[in-house]
Image (cartoon, grey):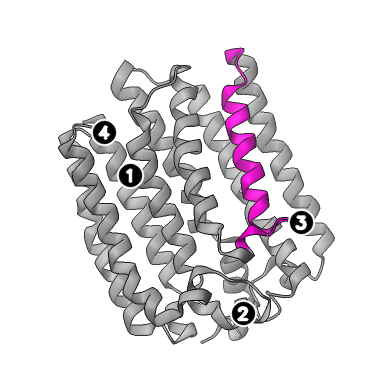
C-alpha cells in the first residue's frame, strides 16, 4: 500500500510524524545526563521547560518544511504533506510560527530565571540553521547540506545548550556525546531520501542519495553506522566516556537491521520508505542508553 492509498487517519499520522519528536528529546536528555553526572543534581523546572520548548520548535520545523516544500513542488506526490492534506498552506505556515513563538517563550523564561541568555542564543542559532535547510532564500538542503546542518544543530548546539541549562558553565565534556547524537540524527535525514530520489531530482534537490544513487547510498550506510559505534569505543579508550557508555552498543542490532533493510529495498520506494523510522528508533535507543551510560 502506497501513501497515496493509505486511510486518512494514517496519512495524518505520517504527516504529523510523532516518532520524529525524539530528535528534540534525546539531545536534552544526554546533555542533562552529563550535567547530572557532574553535580548530582537536576533542575527539573529548567529541564521540562527546555524539553517542551524543543518539542514545539521541532513542530515548527516539521510544519515549515511542508510549507517550503510546497513552494518548490517537491511534495506534489506526497499525500501525507500537511499542506496537501489541509489544502491551506497559509494556515500551516502560521500554525508553525505559533509553535515557534511558544517555544521561544519557554526559552525566554529560562533566560529570565537564570539571568543568562546563553541557552536562548544557542537555540536561536539552531533555529536559524534549521530555517536555512528548507527556507528561502537559502534552501541549503537542496544543495545537499541538510545532514551537516542537522549534525550541528542537534549535536554540538543542542547538547551543549542542554548541558549549559543545568550548569551555566562551559565544558568540553558534552562534545563527544554531541558528536554521537549529531551523527545519529543526521542518519535519520540521510535515510529519509532513499524513497524520494525521483521527486528530489525533479525539483532540483541534490540530496546525498540523489547524488550517490540508492545503491551506493546503501553500501555507504554500514560504514556510517559502524563509524558511530566505533567512535563510542574510541571515546571510551581516550577516557572521554565512562565505561558505562558501552551500554549504547545494545542498540547495534537496530543498526544492522537498518543496513539490511536499506540494502534489500534501496531501489523500491514503497518498501524502503520505512527505513527512516528504523533510523529514528536507532537514534532514540542509542541516545537513551548513551545517557544512562553517562549517568553510570
- Secondary structure found at label 4: helix
Q: How far across and how far down the image is residue 147, in percent? A: 50, 57
Mark pair 1, 2: CA separation: 36 Å
* Residue 40 seen in this snapshot: no
Q: Earlier in the sequence, mark 3 or mark 2?
A: 3
Q: Earlier in the sequence, mark 1 or mark 2?
A: 2
Q: Earlier in the sequence, mark 4 or mark 3?
A: 3
Q: Is residue 130 above or below residue 221?
A: above
Q: How far across and how far down the image is residue 122, in percent? A: 58, 31
**In the displayed structure, does residue 293 sit left or right of residue 23?**
left
**Cβ–Cβ below 8 Å for labels 3 and 1?**
no
Camera-nearest residue between 121 and 257: 121
Camera-nearest residue between 150 and 285: 150
In which quadrant is the C terminus drawn? top left
The picture quadrant where one finds residue 251 is bottom left
**Residue plotted at (39% across, 52% down):** 183
Label ID, residue 288: 1
Q: Residues within 10 Å of mark 1 (few under 14, many from 20)?
A: many
Label ID, residue 201: 2
**In the displayed structure, does residue 257 sit left or right of residue 147?**
left
Label ID, residue 137: 3
Instruction: Report the magenta residues as a range.
Output: 114-141
Q: Residues within 10 Å of mark 4 (few under 14, many from 20)?
A: many
Whether the magenta-drawn stretch holds residue 7 is answered as no
The picture quadrant where one finds residue 67 is bottom right
Q: Is residue 266 above or below residue 287?
A: below
Mark pair 4, 3: CA separation: 40 Å
**Residue plotted at (49% across, 69% down):** 208
Q: Residues within 10 Å of mark 2 (few under 14, many from 20)?
A: some
Whether the magenta-drawn stretch holds residue 132 is answered as yes
Q: Which residue is mark 4?
A: 294
Amino acid at each position: 500500500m502506497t501513501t497515496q492509498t493509505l486511510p486518512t487517519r494514517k496519512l495524518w499520522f505520517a504527516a504529523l510524524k510523532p516518532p520524529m519528536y525524539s530528535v528534540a528529546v534525546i539531545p536534552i536528555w544526554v546533555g542533562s545526563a552529563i550535567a547530572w553526572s557532574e553535580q548530582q543534581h537536576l533542575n527539573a523546572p529548567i529541564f521540562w521547560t527546555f524539553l517542551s520548548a524543543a518539542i514545539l520548535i521541532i513542530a515548527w520545523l516539521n510544519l515549515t518544511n511542508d510549507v517550503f516544500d510546497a513552494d518548490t513542488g517537491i511534495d506534489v506526490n506526497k499525500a501525507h504533506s500537511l499542506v496537501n492534506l489541509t489544502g491551506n498552506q497559509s494556515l500551516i505556515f502560521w500554525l508553525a510560527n505559533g509553535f515557534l513563538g511558544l517555544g521561544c517563550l519557554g526559552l525566554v523564561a529560562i533566560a529570565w530565571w537564570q539571568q543568562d541568555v546563553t541557552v536562548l542564543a544557542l537555540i536561536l542559532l539552531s533555529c536559524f540553521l534549521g530555517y536555512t535547510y528548507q527556507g528561502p532564500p537559502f534552501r541549503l538542503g537542496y544543495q545537499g547540506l541538510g545532514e551537516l546542518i542537522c549534525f550541528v544543530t542537534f549535536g554540538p548546539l543542542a547538547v551543549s545548550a542542554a548541558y549549559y541549562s543545568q550548569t551555566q558553565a562551559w565544558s568540553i565534556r558534552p562534545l563527544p556525546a554531541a558528536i554521537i547524537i549529531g551523527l545519529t540524527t543526521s542518519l535519520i535525514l540521510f535515510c529519509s531520501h532513499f524513497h524520494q530520489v525521483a521527486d528530489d531530482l525533479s525539483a532540483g534537490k541534490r540530496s546525498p542519495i540523489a547524488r550517490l544513487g540508492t545503491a551506493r547510498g546503501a553500501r555507504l550506510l554500514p560504514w556510517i553506522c559502524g563509524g558511530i559505534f566505533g567512535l563510542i569505543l574510541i571515546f571510551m579508550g581516550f577516557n572521554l566516556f565512562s565505561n558505562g557508555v558501552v551500554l549504547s552498543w545494545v542498540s547495534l542490532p537496530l543498526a544492522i537491521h537498518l543496513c539490511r533493510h536499506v540494502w534489500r529495498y534501496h531501489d523500491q520506494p514503497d518498501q524502503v520508505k520505512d527505513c527512516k523510522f528504523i533510523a529514528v528508533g536507532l537514534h532514540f535507543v542509542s541516545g537513551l542508553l548513551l545517557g544512562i551510560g553517562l549517568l553510570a
